[in-house]
Each structure stands twice: as structure tokens, then as C-alpha cells.
């Protein structure tokens, strides 16, 4: 009896049309949380006896990388709408083997949704790669997986792409609203959560997503809840400029800057026998082309960096 070995060894994305030649900007999921690849039927044909016949084959890959660099976040925006190639390698099925190799390239490229999350538990990016292929094309992809030669990447030296220099940990530096006016200090925080995720539509024929907007939500709960602090919050504009900064390795950082008129502010005050706190919530959808990235000295990294050390995301400028 053959027992298959579970697990995904490597997941690497790069610019569309480059995987089979010279991969441009290949990024591995590397140090990550769980990942799953699922193949299933898509829109099976049904007859009057409720029989289901093959139509299309759906592929869905969901990793969650802890190497959530600003460079990867910028590429997520570039890669939506099928603008990427993807290579997925499973764990080997025999000693000395290379694993099954699935290549999603031109003609069977995947759609992309993603969610970027920062909280006290970590900083991660969770992409969802998905496409439904005609049955014959899907069967060909699966049939060739155990014999396809994997692409190697000069910039990715670890077999899984693990790189501790790219690992992003939660490290609050500041939150300003408006920019230049800190709201709280790190020691006042009860909890915090920042998320960026795609707002997408599915293409019925291919089950790929198209992305027009990103959903931003920033929530902070803190214990400096004096009347003076409440009045300070109530006097703020409801759509102020915002600046959020998280520390990276050494002196590098990631920063998010929001122009005025982008996110809306709502607040809640609670005083109970257990706690006294203020919760701030900033949220709104932002058109994908109203977002830009800046890298280099004074932007989170250094003169040679393109976002792997640090960077700045500018929203609504």
C-alpha cells in the first residue's frame, strides 16, 4: 500500500510570463503558518437525475507567510487580476525525490486575493491563489506534476525560501492622527489590529478574482481613557491624516501614511468594573490605484533597499 506524504515544500510567485525564462521578483512564502492546496470540481454539469459530470477543475492554494515585507505587499497589488506566475512544490513522495511541481503560468495563471494583518500575535500576509481550468487543461497540469522540473531561483537559497531577515514581528512604534500627533504610547495599548484585504469580484468562467478596492481597517483599544483624552478624540476630524509605524530589523521600519479624507474615525468609550478604555476604529475602502509605495533612505529602508528591509505605503495622496 502506497502512503502519500503530506505538505507543501515551496510556494514561489513571480511576475507574469517570467517563471519559464528568467523569473522577475520571485518571492517565496518562506517562514509561514499553515498552507493548503486543494483541487476540486468547478461548475459540474448536472442532469435531471442529479448526476454530476466533469466540467472544469478548480485549484486553490492558501499559504500564510510570516515574511510579510513591504516589498511583498507591493507585489501583491501588482499581481492581482492574474498578473503573476506561481510554482508550488509538494514534499517529496520518496527519499531523494524533488516533490510534485505545479506551475501556474500563461494560459493557466491564477487569480489573487490577499489579507495583510498586524496584531500582537504577528504580522502576516495570507494570499489566496485560485483558478478554474478546463478539465483537460487541469488534467494535463496534474499529470505532469510528478515529472515537471522545478525552477530554481538565484535569490532564494533555502529550499522553502525561509529567511529570518525577512521575518516580520509585531513591534509598535507610533500611531498618529493627524500625522504628527501621537494618540497613545505602546504601554497604553490593550489590543490592536490592522488589516488590509482585497475587495474582489469573481469571474464566473475561470473563478479568478478581479480587484478594484482594498479594505482598510485599523482598530486600537487603549487605557488612557480620561475625560481629557475623550475630548481630545471627539475634537479630531473624522477623516484625519494618519501615520502608523512598525519597527523592523535594526533601525528599519514599515510605515503607512493616509491622506485626509481617506479613512473614517469612530470611537467608543467603556467604563466597567473590569476595565476603562477607549476604542478607535478607522476604516474604509480605497481604490487600488490610489495607493503607492516608496522605498529607500528615509522611507523605512536604505539606499540599496527595494522594500525587503522597510518601506512606506501611501494611501490617497
Image (spheres, rainbow, N blue to C red):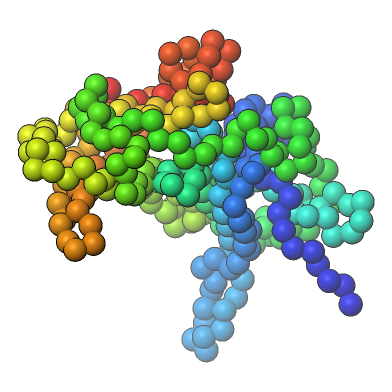
Q: Residue 220: percent from the left, percent from the top?
A: 28, 45
- Going 36% across and 47% down the picture, which residue do you hit? 193
Q: Quadrant of the N terminus?
A: bottom right
Judge from the rendering whether residue 84 lies leftward or rightward of residue 179; answer left or right: right
- Going 61% across and 56% down the picture, which residue do you hit? 34
Q: Residue 38: percent from the left, percent from the top?
A: 62, 62
- Between 121 and 24, the residue placed more toward the observer is 121
Query: Which residue is at the far right?
Result: 96
Q: Residue 98: percent from the left, percent from the top?
A: 85, 49
Judge from the rendering whether residue 191 lies leftward or rightward of residue 58; answer left or right: left
Q: Is residue 202 above or below residue 273?
A: above
Query: Which residue is at the far bottom?
Result: 49
- Going 19% across and 53% down the picture, which residue do you hit? 276
Q: Quadrant of the C terminus?
A: top left
Judge from the rendering whether residue 82 lies leftward or rightward of residue 184; answer left or right: right
Q: Is residue 153 above or below residue 221?
A: above
Q: Is residue 109 above or below residue 139?
A: above
- Going 14% across and 51% down the picture, which residue do you hit? 269
- Between 82 and 25, the residue placed more toward the observer is 25
Residue 273 appears in view: yes
Amino acid at each position: 500500500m502506497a502512503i502519500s506524504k503530506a505538505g507543501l515544500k515551496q510556494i514561489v510567485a513571480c511576475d507574469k510570463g517570467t517563471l519559464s525564462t528568467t523569473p522577475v521578483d520571485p518571492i517565496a512564502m518562506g517562514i509561514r503558518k499553515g498552507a493548503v492546496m486543494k483541487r476540486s470540481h468547478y461548475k459540474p454539469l448536472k442532469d435531471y437525475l442529479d448526476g454530476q459530470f466533469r466540467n472544469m477543475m478548480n485549484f486553490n492554494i492558501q499559504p500564510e507567510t510570516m515574511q510579510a515585507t513591504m516589498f511583498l505587499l507591493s507585489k501583491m497589488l501588482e499581481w492581482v487580476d492574474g498578473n503573476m506566475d506561481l510554482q508550488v512544490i509538494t514534499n517529496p513522495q520518496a527519499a531523494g525525490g524533488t516533490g510534485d511541481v505545479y506551475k501556474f503560468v500563461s494560459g493557466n495563471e491564477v487569480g489573487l486575493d490577499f489579507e495583510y494583518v498586524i496584531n500582537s500575535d504577528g504580522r502576516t500576509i495570507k494570499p489566496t491563489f485560485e483558478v478554474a481550468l478546463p478539465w483537460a487543461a487541469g488534467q494535463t497540469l496534474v499529470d505532469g506534476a510528478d515529472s515537471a522540473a522545478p525552477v530554481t531561483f538565484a535569490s532564494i537559497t533555502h529550499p522553502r525560501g525561509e529567511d529570518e531577515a525577512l521575518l516580520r514581528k509585531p513591534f509598535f512604534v507610533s500611531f498618529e492622527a493627524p500625522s504628527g500627533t501621537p494618540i497613545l504610547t505602546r504601554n497604553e495599548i490593550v489590543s490592536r489590529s490592522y488589516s488590509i484585504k482585497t475587495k474582489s469580484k469573481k469571474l464566473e468562467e475561470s473563478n479568478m478574482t478581479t480587484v478594484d478596492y482594498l479594505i482598510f481597517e485599523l482598530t486600537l483599544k487603549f487605557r488612557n481613557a480620561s475625560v481629557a483624552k475623550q475630548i481630545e478624540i471627539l475634537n479630531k476630524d473624522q477623516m484625519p491624516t494618519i501615520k502608523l509605524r512598525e519597527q523592523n530589523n535594526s533601525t528599519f521600519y514599515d510605515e503607512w501614511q493616509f491622506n485626509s479624507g481617506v479613512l473614517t474615525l469612530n470611537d467608543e468609550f467603556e467604563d466597567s468594573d473590569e476595565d476603562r478604555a477607549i476604542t478607535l476604529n478607522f476604516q474604509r475602502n480605497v481604490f487600488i490605484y490610489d495607493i503607492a509605495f516608496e522605498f529607500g533612505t528615509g522611507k523605512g529602508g536604505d539606499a540599496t533597499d527595494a522594500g525587503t528591509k522597510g518601506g512606506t505605503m501611501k494611501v490617497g495622496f
